[in-house]
Image (cartoon, rainbow, N blue to C red):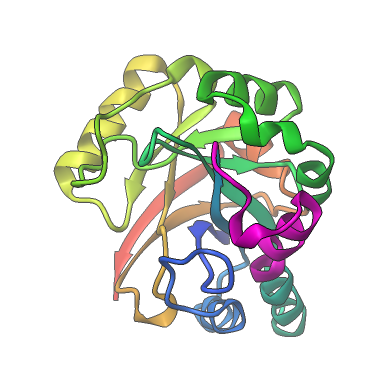
Amino acid sequence: MMFRYELHCHTREVSPCAHAGAEDVAKYYASRNYTGLFITDHFVTGRDIPYGLSWEGWIKKFGEGYEIAKKAGEKLNLKVFFGFEYTCLPHAGTDFLVYGLDGDWLLAHPEINTMPIRKGLEFLLCEGAFIVQAHPFRESSYIEMIRLLPRHVHGVEVINANRNNTENGAASAYADYYELYRLAGTDNHLGDKQKRFCGIDTGIEIEKPVDLRKIAESGKYTLFDETR
């Protein structure tokens, strides 16, 4: 039996660039017979806490998309897991998918908000996070330069549904050169309006977020890339 997982998905409740609500996201993935998905809303550090909130208030707000999707998933036989897409300003566009740490961990560690990018990644790694650099060769007008930190990640998102063949191809070569785990994610901001989907199929069921690292280490998974 194979299990299908989405590893990179955003919700409107938390990620300003997302257009789909968390409940609708869960309903859509359940309708496509996914086993589970990771909600990886944008977690941006190196700035003032958004909306004038306290750290506690912000972390509570940050978890809303995940909590809503998880509640919906429980009714739909869809497992929903917590993750986040870590960005440390001023390095906009240098993004990392972080798995295995939860909202309680974020609440307990406000110091992550003031750590520079390398120190932040080192801290996350020391705390047991599984880190995948997202779309490392993405090109956009707001991205000053491409930054690679191969010694601070476990894996690379070698297929991202919103990136072209050149960008994904470069990511694949990067992962191979540094012998990093190869993973894929849709980077879904559109919910059911998304046309291309990427992720992993595996014979190992994920029960908790840390299981993703075990799957990567086992090599017992395949990447999928589909257009509907």
- 228 displayed left or right of 97: left
Task: Identify which residue is drawn at 33% across, 35% down.
Answer: 136
Classify 156 as above or below 191.
Answer: above
14, 185: nearer the viewer: 14
58, 82: nearer the viewer: 58
Q: Is residue 65 magenta?
A: yes
User: Which portion, as a residue range, is magenta?
Assistant: 46-66
Task: Identify which residue is drawn at 49% across, 14% down.
Answer: 151
- Can I make out residue 15 in this image? yes
Residue 31: image x %, image y %? 53, 84
Residue 154: image x %, image y %? 54, 26
- 6 displayed left or right of 187: right
Q: From the image, give the main secondary structure of the stretch colored magenta.
A: helix
Residue 183: image x %, image y %? 45, 41
Q: Is residue 91 magenta?
A: no
Task: Identify which residue is drawn at 43% across, 20% down.
Answer: 149
Name the quarter where the C terminus is drawn: bottom left
